[in-house]
Image (cartoon, grey):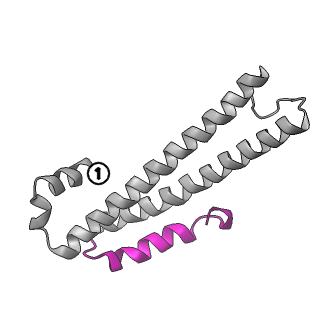
Amino acid sequence: MPAWAVARTNGKAALLPEDRAEVYERLAHEAEQLEGAKERLRKVQLDTIAFGLRLGTAVEAGATLHLIPADRDILMQSLASELASYIEVIHWNALWAGACEAVADNVTSTAAMTPYLRKRLAALPPEFN
């Protein structure tokens, strides 16, 4: 949303009707939340990679690992965090996609955006909500 950020800083956003500005602000919010979720996912993925490096092996599907209980617990926590982060990214991506669709359909208020957001969330499998 660089264009919206520029419009906010140079004062051009003030030229829009308040409801329309709120729509773009909501779109920017959803994009920021998605980027934050992606960053958190990258961090937990690095934790899993670091764990594998410590063991001298890659943690990947099909790998056979011989772990002591403490390492097993660390790996389980790392994988659970990674899964939770994937779910968070999918959730925020759905909200952002709904917000983009609303803007593309030229909605004029955040209230009018809500059905788009709900529709995208409802389309996700239950484990992603």
Q: Secondary structure at mark 1?
A: loop
Between 129 and 41, the residue placed more toward the observer is: 41
Is residue 31 highlighted in magenta? no
Q: Residue under circle 1?
A: 1
Is residue 110 highlighted in magenta? yes
Q: Which residues are magenta?
A: 106-129
Between 5 and 124, the residue placed more toward the observer is: 5
Q: Residue at x 82, y 43 (%)?
A: 73
Between 84 and 27, the residue placed more toward the observer is: 84
Q: Residue at x 10, y 58 (%)?
A: 11
Our reading of the magenta stretch's main secondary structure is: helix
Q: Residue at x 62, y 37 (%)?
A: 45
Pinpoint residue 52: horizontal percent, then vertical percent: 74, 27
Say whether residue 87 is left or right of residue 80. left
- Above or below residue 122? Residue 12 is above
Pinpoint residue 74: horizontal percent, then vertical percent: 78, 40
